[in-house]
Image (tube, helix red, strand yellow):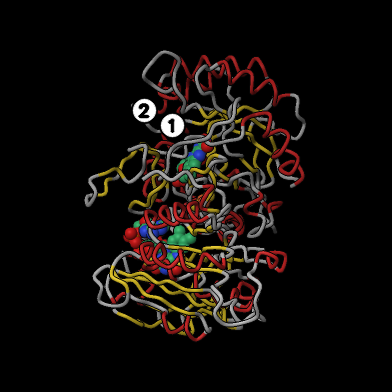
């Protein structure tokens, strides 16, 4: 019998648990040469902001042991151009579409973006990328439980769409932020975003990327991500979308065993653009081999 | 169309100390590859190093693609250890490629029938930048091939004569080749851009249609300046660190007069005049 890979994220029903991580899949069209996009559980877009952003100075990326640093700086065409130039094609793939949004200066931009997206049928869910500045403070919203609560609560009032809050690992207690997002009405959590890091070229004595520090991703961060998913799973009730260094079926299963309902493939899309579809097949094989009928029975089934 | 394929290594040999030529078989990529396009090659399955490595398409030979590369770090070192019969995970052809003069450009060609005319195009290669330019020269040599003076003039620059590559191959296409070395161990002593400046005042009477160049960033900036001065359009092929190579990550940005562009997708070839040169 074919095992059941279906999962629910809030009211959103997905045919399988394999998603792509925001910012690592462009606006999907770049991957149409490599995979049948229809096979994906859902597509998550590059984070958009209200106004266009040109992004950071180059160089923006560098390789690190088992990973990479990036400081793209949320380059995106802005809401209006996204709706006009990107959305029609994204909607045509026939895969649930999750639009990632962020604010630049004022957290109220989240509400404005959510309101605009709320009216659009082809948008299945909204992901809040709260790794953005906290108004008037030196921290990010994602680093402050109260600010996280405030933003999620406001956005919750402005949309009925499934709401996913994406957490940053650059915090002392990930469970505090997770609980704040849950209490404020988030339908699900996505974790983890990149870990702040830095790499130096000793010959020139310069940082390898222009912004000096950036976000670390790839297999190097996986153990941290798995641990955070596991901690959060024990503390909250809403579904978790796990990510951070997933490159194959086994690494995807680590997250599911730790408590993730679904997983996202990020950096691995660059290395092998077929990673997502290979993982979908791999999870199905694993379930068959272990005589598990439904993926839901595997979620959080860590033995310890 | 962009392909991800397992390409069989036909040959991988050191042709000069530290420089290798690799031939891989990939029918699909070879069929459509344009000069200036590149391949993004996965050299390890275990993730160390993690990212693919971009290499220019040096030559296309039937179903075979040639890559000319220098060992500079861990990725290229692993590349150099690969043996014929092994398979490489290759994505390509990537990027836009050079645009060639068309027959529409011919009214600009100097009148005259043969011999004694200046070159219609000039190729300027700096160091490893020679890699994508051989395939370009081949296409250029035949694109306006019925005209005796239509072969590109090729200027090759290197640190010393030991780092000079491809002179013979360009000559075999019928191109005139001039050499510049920093230490004067062969040809003109000095930078290849200085050699270009020396040559242009003579060539300008039969104004070339285009300059094509690839090499270190400061050299390309100088090419841009020269192209401005002589009012000859220049196309330059840029390098930037790449995570994906196919336009998805926005990691390979270069600043242009129209804002940031992706070197991997909108380039790697740009009109020199459109780049906002910094250093
Ligand atoms: C479009 C394009 C075409 C290229 N064509 C050729 C070619 O035909 N022959 C050739 O020898 N080299 C070419 N290069 C440069 C080649 O990609 C680098 O030499 C190679 O990536 C070095 O990898 P490494 O692991 O040996 O070195 P390392 O320095 O250890 O690499 C570390 C990281 O930096 C990146 N990197 C290092 N140098 C460069 C560079 N110059 N450009 C971009 N990324 C770099 C690597 O990809 C890797 O992610 C090209 C680069 C680009 C962008
Ligand atoms: C190049 C790049 C760009 C990214 N852009 C975004 C973004 O726009 N919004 C966001 O929420 N996360 C962004 N991320 C973070 C990823 O979505 C993901 O959370 C992180 O990379 C960890 O997963 P991975 O190790 O599988 O890549 C980006 C990551 C990378 C590597
Ligand atoms: S390398 Fe990813 S967009 Fe160019």
**Circle count:** 2
Q: Is residue A243 visible?
A: no
Image quadrant containing the N terminus of chain A = bottom right
Residue position for label 2:
A171
Callout 2 touching callout 1 (CB < 8 Å)? yes
Label 1 neighbour load within 10 Å: few <14, some 14-19, many 20+: many
Secondary structure under tag 1 reads loop
Front in this rendered view, residue B227 or A209:
B227
Q: Is residue A190 above or below residue B133?
A: above
- Distance CA(mark 2)–CA(mark 1): 7 Å
Picture quadrant of residue A195: top left
Front in this rendered view, residue A32 or A170:
A32
In this rendering, position of residue B251 left or right of residue B92: left
Image quadrant containing the C terminus of chain A = top left
Front in this rendered view, residue A70 or A144:
A70
Q: Is residue A109 visible?
A: yes
Identify which residue is drawn at 58% across, 52% down.
B266
In percent of width and height, residue A60 lies at 42, 44
Residue position for label 1:
A168
In percent of width and height, residue A104 lies at 51, 23
Q: Is residue A293 above or below residue A113?
A: below
Q: Chain of mark 1?
A: A
Identify which residue is drawn at 32% across, 81% down.
B16
Q: Chain of mark 2?
A: A
Identify which residue is drawn at 52% across, 43% down.
B256
Secondary structure under tag 2 reads loop
In percent of width and height, residue B43 lies at 42, 68
Circle on res. A26: none
């Amino acid at each position: 019998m074919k095992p059941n890979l279906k999962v629910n994220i809030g009211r959103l029903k997905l045919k399988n648990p394999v998603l792509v991580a925001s910012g690592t899949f462009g606006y999907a069209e770049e991957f149409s040469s490599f995979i049948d996009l229809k096979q994906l559980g859902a597509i998550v877009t590059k984070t958009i902001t209200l106004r266009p952003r040109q992004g950071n100075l180059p160089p923006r990326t560098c390789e690190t042991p088992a990973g990479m640093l990036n400081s793209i700086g949320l380059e995106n065409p802005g809401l209006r151009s996204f709706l006009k130039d990107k959305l029609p094609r994204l909607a045509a793939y026939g895969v649930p579409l999750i639009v990632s949004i962020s604010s630049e200066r004022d957290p109220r931009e989240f509400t404005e973006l959510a309101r605009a997206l709320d009216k659009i049928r082809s948008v299945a869910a909204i992901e809040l990328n709260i790794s953005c500045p906290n108004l008037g403070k030196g921290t990010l919203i994602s680093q402050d439980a109260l600010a996280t609560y405030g933003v999620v609560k406001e956005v919750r009032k402005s949309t009925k769409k499934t709401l996913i809050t994406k957490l940053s690992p650059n915090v002392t207690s990930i469970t505090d932020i997770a609980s704040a997002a849950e209490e404020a009405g988030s339908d699900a959590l996505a974790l983890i975003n990149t870990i702040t890091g830095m790499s130096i070229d000793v010959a020139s004595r310069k940082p390898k990327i222009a912004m000096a520090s950036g976000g670390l991703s790839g297999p190097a961060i996986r153990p941290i991500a798995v641990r955070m998913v596991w901690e959060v799973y024990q503390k909250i009730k809403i579904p978790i979308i796990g990510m951070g260094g997933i490159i194959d079926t086994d690494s995807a299963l680590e997250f599911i065993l730790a408590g993730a309902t679904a997983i996202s493939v990020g950096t691995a899309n660059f290395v092998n653009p077929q990673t997502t579809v290979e993982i979908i097949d791999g999870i199905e094989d694993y379930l068959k081999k272990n005589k598990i009928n439904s993926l839901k029975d595997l979620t959080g089934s860590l033995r310890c | 169309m962009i392909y991800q394929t397992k390409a069989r290594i036909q040959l991988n040999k050191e042709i000069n100390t530290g420089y290798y030529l690799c031939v891989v078989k990939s029918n699909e990529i070879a069929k459509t590859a344009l000069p200036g396009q590149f391949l993004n090659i996965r050299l390890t399955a275990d993730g160390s190093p993690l990212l693919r490595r971009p290499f220019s398409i040096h030559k296309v030979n039937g179903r075979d693609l040639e890559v000319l590369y220098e060992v500079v770090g861990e990725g290229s070192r692993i590349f150099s250890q690969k043996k014929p019969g092994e398979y490489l995970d290759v994505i390509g052809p990537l990027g836009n490629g050079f645009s060639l003069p068309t027959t529409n450009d011919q009214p600009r060609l100097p009148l005259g029938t043969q011999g004694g005319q200046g070159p219609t195009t000039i190729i300027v290669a700096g160091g490893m930048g020679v890699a994508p330019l051989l395939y370009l020269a081949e296409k250029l040599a035949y694109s306006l091939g019925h005209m005796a003076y239509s072969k590109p003039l090729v200027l090759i620059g290197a640190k010393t004569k030991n780092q000079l590559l491809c002179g013979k191959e360009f000559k075999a296409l019928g191109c005139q080749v001039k050499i510049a070395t920093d230490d004067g161990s062969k040809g003109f002593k000095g930078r290849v851009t200085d050699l270009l400046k020396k040559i242009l005042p003579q060539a300008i009477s039969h104004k070339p249609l285009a300059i094509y160049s690839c090499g270190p960033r400061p050299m390309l900036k100088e090419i841009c300046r020269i192209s401005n001065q002589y009012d000859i359009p220049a196309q330059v092929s840029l390098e930037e660190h790449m995570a994906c190579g196919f336009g998805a990550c926005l990691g390979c940005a270069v600043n242009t007069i129209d804002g940031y562009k992706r070197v991997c997708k909108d380039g790697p070839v740009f009109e020199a005049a459109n780049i906002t040169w910094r250093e």
